[in-house]
């Protein structure tokens, strides 16, 4: 009787090849009014586009959607399902990469003010300024705020921040959001594209309208 229970020799099974996610091209996150997006979709469909050519968007706040633009060097293209399929990319990979790029770009923010009240701009690409709300943990010193962060983004090109318990500042934020929003509606070329007439707060990773208690 032997000491070893030897099994018949079998060729080791071949391991499946590791799948490597294709490189994600430079991609920007842009916030846009939901009604603007709906009009964009209607225009694209009217021009004869198929469903997989429609720009991808997800709701990010009341009346606001999040979109993604691929940088092609000499122009930008709104991310569509066709882009994902042709490049072999997953939406999750593109969104993750875009957020990481936004975090890196936060180094270029111009933050003015103090004592828990800030005015934020992004000179390199003003239209992306409001998008930095999505990575506020990268650049906002919340220890200086009275309460949770409240954001006014009446237009995409300028961002104001204060604390929810700073009563005087909150009153000003409500007015700022409304005033800038109306200015954007009346002259978006000079005042920036309108975004939200109401201040916003981040709750459990989701932007919501701020309401005074």
Image (cartoon, helix red, strand yellow):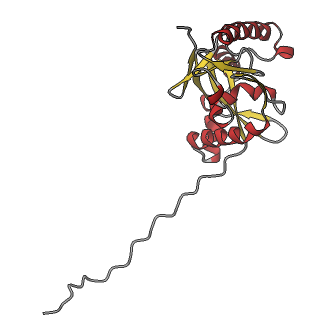
Give the residue at the far bottom of this rendering: 1
Give the residue at the far left of this rendering: 1
- Seen in the picture, residue 82 relative to 58 is either above or below; the reply is below
- Seen in the picture, residue 109 relative to 23 is either above or below; the reply is above
Residue in the picture at 67% in, 14% down: 196
Task: Give the image location of residue 184, x and y in percent.
Answer: 78, 11
Residue in the picture at 33% in, 79% down: 10
Which of the 4 quarters of the picture holds residue 71?
top right
- Can residue 194 be seen here? The reply is yes
Task: Give the image location of residue 203, x and y in percent.
Answer: 52, 23
- Seen in the picture, residue 213 relative to 28 is either above or below; the reply is above
Which of the 4 quarters of the picture holds residue 153?
top right
Residue in the picture at 82% in, 36% down: 75
Residue toward you, 201 or 186: 201
Residue toward you, 102 or 67: 102
- Determine whether, in the image, residue 182 is placed left or right of residue 198: right
Q: How many labels does the image show?
A: 0
- Can residue 55 be seen here? The reply is no
Task: Give the image location of residue 33, x and y in percent.
Answer: 67, 17
- Determine whether, in the image, residue 65 is placed left or right of residue 73: left
Which of the 4 quarters of the picture holds residue 183?
top right
Residue toward you, 212 or 92: 212
Quadrant for the N terminus in the image:
bottom left
């Amino acid at each position: 009787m032997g000491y070893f229970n030897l099994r018949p020799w079998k060729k080791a099974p071949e391991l499946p090849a590791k799948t490597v996610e294709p490189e994600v091209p430079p991609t920007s996150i842009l916030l846009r009014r939901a009604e603007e997006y709906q009009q964009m979709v209607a225009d694209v469909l009217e021009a004869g586009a198929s469903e997989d050519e429609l720009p991808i968007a997800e709701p990010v706040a009341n009346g606001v959607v999040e979109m993604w633009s691929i940088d092609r060097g000499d122009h930008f293209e709104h991310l569509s399902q066709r882009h994902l399929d042709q490049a072999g990319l997953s939406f999750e990979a593109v969104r993750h990469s875009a957020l990481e790029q936004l975090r890196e770009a936060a180094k270029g923010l111009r933050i003015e003010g103090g004592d828990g009240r800030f005015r934020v701009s992004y000179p390199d690409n003003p239209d992306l300024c409001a998008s930095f709300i999505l990575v506020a943990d990268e650049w906002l010193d919340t220890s200086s705020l009275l309460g949770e962060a409240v954001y006014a983004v009446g237009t995409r090109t300028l961002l104001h921040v204060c604390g929810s318990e700073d009563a005087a500042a909150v009153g000003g934020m409500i007015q700022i959001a409304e005033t800038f929003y109306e200015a954007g509606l009346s002259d978006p070329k000079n005042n920036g594209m309108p975004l939200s007439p109401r201040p916003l707060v981040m709750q459990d990773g989701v932007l919501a309208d701020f309401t005074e208690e």
